[in-house]
Structures are given as C-alpha cells and as structure tokens.
Amino acid sequence: MTAKTRKLISPALRAAMLWPHTWAGVTLGGLLMLIFFMGSLAVFASEIDRWMMPATRVGAVETGPASLDHAVLPAVEKLAAGRTVRDWYVQLPDERRPVMALQLRTETGNAGGMATSDGQLLPPVGTLGGTYFFYPLHYSLHLRAGFIGYWIVCFASVAMLAGLISGVIIHARIFKDFFTFRSWGQFRRSLLDLHNLTGVLVLPFHLMITITGIVIVLPIVLPAGVQALYGGDVRRFYDDALGNYSRPRSGIAAPLAPLDPMVAEARRLWGGGEPAVVFVYNAGDAASVVRINRALRDRISLDVQPVFFDGVTGQVLKYQRPGPVVATHRVLSGLHFAAFDHWPLRWLYLLFGLSGCMLIGTGMLYWMEKRRVAHGVKPGVGWRSVAAIACGSTSGLLIATLAMMAANRLLPAGIPSRELVEVGLFFLIWIGSAVHAAVRTRTDPPWSEQCTAVALLAAACVALNWITTGEHPIRAVASADWAVLGVDVVLALTAVAAWRVSRRLAQRPDPELSTLAKVTDHA
C-alpha cells in the first residue's frame, strides 16, 4: 500500500474497520479454524482414505474396469444380497482411488461397500475416512437438517471475507511489514508479523477460496429466486440449471439395459473424457434412469456434464450444456473444490489452506497477548474463555484428528459401528482438549503440553500404520503407493514440527506485563 493510498484511508475509517476485524476473529476464529483445517485435509481426502482403509490399497494396474456390465453389476448384486434395490450408484476407480465405491438404497435400508475393479467386494472398511468425515465437516459441520450447517459455514465465510478486507484497511503498512518477521523475539510482535506475513503472501488465495465457498451455497442461503420462479421446487430448479432429469417409478418391472453402450455414447457426447460416477434410479423399473457423470480431473470447472439414459432402452433422455451463468458458477465451484488432476496445485492448495489456519490462529493469539497487557497477568473470565477456545480449536483440533487416525489403526475390524466409534472418539477427545485448555488456562494456555501430545500422536500414527499393515516406506516406494507414503511423511513432519514448537514454548518465559507494555502496537 503506497503512501498516497494510505492518505486516502482516514484514521476514522481504520478505527471503524478495527471493530469488525477484531470481533469477527475473536468470536468465529475457532469455527473458521475448523473450516480451513478440514478444507485443507479434504484436498487429499482420497489419499487419507487409502491410509485409513488398508483394504483399498490395491495396485494401480487394477484400476479402470474394462466392462461395467461384467464388473459393476455383479458387485451390486453381491452387495444387495437378495434385497430389492431401488437406486444405486458406483464411483468408478481412478489413479487416486483405485477401487469402486458402491452405494445402494434398498427396500429395507441403505448399503454401501468397496470393490476392486473386477467386481470383487472388499471387507467393510469400518471408517468414514477423509471423504465422508473430514470433507463434510468442512462445508456442513455434519449438520444437514434444514441446511443449518451450510448456513453456519456461510455466515462464518462472510465474516472471514469481512476480516480479510478490513485487515488490509487496518494495517496501512501491511505490505511494508510483509518483509519484516521477528521470530521468537518479542512474542506479541512475532505474532503480528506472522499474521501480516500469511495475510499478505496468500491474500489472493484466501479471497478466492472464501468468495467461491460463499458462491457455492448461494442457492441454499439465498433461495428467494428459487421461491419466486419455481415456487420453492428446488428439484425443478436444479433440473433446469444443471441439466438434471428425474421421473417417478412406473411400478412395471423391467430389466436394465447394458451399461457399456451408454458409457460409449456418453464419451461421444463429451468429445472425450472418462466416466466418473454412474447412477441408476428406479432400478428394475420400466421408468429406470441411468445417469453418467464425467470425470473432473482434466478440467477446472465442476461441470460433470451428466448424460441421462432410459434404463430399459438405453436411449439418451437428456444432455444439456450449462448456460453462461451456470457455467460461471461451475468454474468458481471448481476453483474451490480443486478436483482437477494437478499435483503441484493440489499441494499449493494444502499449504495455502494451512496458511489460512495460521492467519486465523495468530490473529487470535495476538488478541490474547494484547488483552493480557490491558488486564494484567491475571486476565478475566472473557480472556480465559477465548484462550481456551483458541487452544482447543488449534492444538486441540490436531489432537482430535490424530487420535482418530490412531484409533483407526487400533480398533478391531469387526466391532459393530466401528466408523461411529471413531467419530465419537474424535469429538470426545476434541472436547477433552478444550476442557483441558480451559482448566489449565490461568495466565497462559497449555500450548506446550498439547503440542507435545500432537507430536506423540503423529509419530504414533506413523508407527501404527507400519505395525498394523506392514506398509513401511521402503515397501511403499517399491509398490508405488505414494498416497500412503505421502500421508506418513506429512505425519512425520508434523511430529517433528510439533515437538520443536513444544520445546520452544516450554522455554519461553512467563509473560511479563512490563515487557509487553513496551511493544509498539501497529494494529
């Protein structure tokens, strides 16, 4: 920001921006930390799945079923186990997920499972993994009723956007201070420098990921247009906007036509590309519909270009290219989802997402250190509450995530509802970490203790993977299992970094009011 630009920003405007910037971070910092951290993990959800689901660690040579009719349909029949199937879908294998994921809706309930590319069912995985736990926690908090989770996440995202914009206005010297970082000197100054560094260096990404996240859920949180034009009929809206198609069951039994010719026709309509997901609605009925979605790994846009076929005749029922508005929405959504197959960009998404966690965390810590000066060495209940939330939503969240991964390797495979036990342990340990932070927080949260726990758990996860699966680094390299090796390497680096941070924090002297009072505050 130039001197001329700084003159255009009056002190009154900066003061007005300080309040929303501060309190958006203080009140929603913990929630934003959860959203950013789980979103960062979701970038590699498929790789985390392979780590947490050893049965799916099949070789890449087994991917890509030669015939859906000979591989997928037998697997569906085995999974149905004699029950009448109403609808089903299969996610086809690819390089990142070399197995098929099947989901059935039967007359007696739902069923799901994994299968190899030749249709052999795998043992129950017993976990939700990254795709079905970490990823939904990022965008819906697993609160699906009434879309309440989407509303909460969208509200937090708007607050994040306001915080980013107000932060640029408040820190008039933000770009000059970008080149200044005083590590482990005066703690409060180091926090502000790191806050500025992550805020400036990755500001375009933070703006992009926040805005696109809001855009994705706009039809849900701003349904006025759907209400006015479609009378609240959301299904009809999506049929028109995204080219969907649906029809009720006829009640007349009819067999499913071969799937392979439908896939060939979908490829022709796409002008190339590969199928990613196959849906069969109204299975076994004369009104059955087959939907084939295109894989997204060769494009930024989230447009899956669905092709709908009559399930009995195999004729195309609907194939609609999106209009300009929907196409723009799909591109913005694709920028957020990062479903494209580009490994350097995928790693950048992870690192930039974690930098967002650092931006939020350092902002909360800076507020705490600043208020410590105002309230003395024995802060009040409000300060201690924020300190406990900050500790629980940073190191506590890491502890819960790593504990869930460790439990994934320790829990017996055959226990009932194993995946729910893992989820329960995640939330119990997360709550326990927050309670520990609240109890131990007097003048300083237990950062060192919880960072030590993070280091030990991360190292334990690596060791447990080797012990329970025999997947040591040499074997992983020999079998080209880069997904499992990558997760182990990240866990090992996390253990080393957390241990070093815990030792440095343990050596840091207790905060002294006289020292803190001398720190120049540029905020």
Image (cartoon, helix red, strand yellow):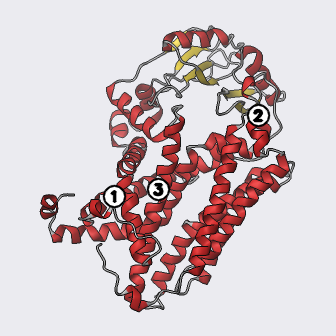
Q: Check whether the beta carbons of the residues at disc 1 and disc 2 lie within 8 A of each other.
A: no
Vertical placement of residue 280 versus 375, above or below: above
**Disc 3 residue crowd, few under 14, some 14–19, many 20+, Cα 10 Å:** many
Residue type at the position of mark 1: Leu
Q: Residue 71 carries which label?
A: none
Q: Marks 1 and 2, how far apart in space?
A: 44 Å
Q: Quadrant of the N terminus?
A: bottom left
Asked whether 298 or 507 is in front, the reply is 507
Question: Can residue 145 be seen in the rendering of this structure?
Answer: no
Asked whether 442 or 69 is in front, the reply is 442
Residue at screen point 53% across, 28% down? 297
Residue at screen point 81% across, 40% down? 124
Vertical placement of residue 34 versus 22, above or below: above
Q: Marks 1 and 3, how far apart in space?
A: 13 Å
Q: Which mark is residue 355?
A: 3
Name the side, left or right, on which 93 lies relative to 70: left
Q: Quadrant of the C terminus?
A: bottom left
Name the side, left or right, on which 206 lies relative to 125: left
Residue 39: x %, y % from top left? 53, 49
Which secondary structure lies at badge 3?
helix
Q: Which mark is residue 479?
A: 2
Q: Check whether the beta carbons of the residues at disc 3 and disc 2 lie within 8 A of each other.
A: no
Residue at screen point 60% across, 19% down? 289
Closest to the camera, between mark 1 and mark 3, is: 3
Name the side, left or right, on which 104 lies relative to 194: right
Q: Mark 1 points at which residue?
A: 164
Question: Can residue 15 be seen in the rendering of this structure?
Answer: yes
The mark that comes first in sequence, 1 or 2, is 1
Residue type at the position of mark 2: Ser
Which secondary structure lies at badge 1?
helix
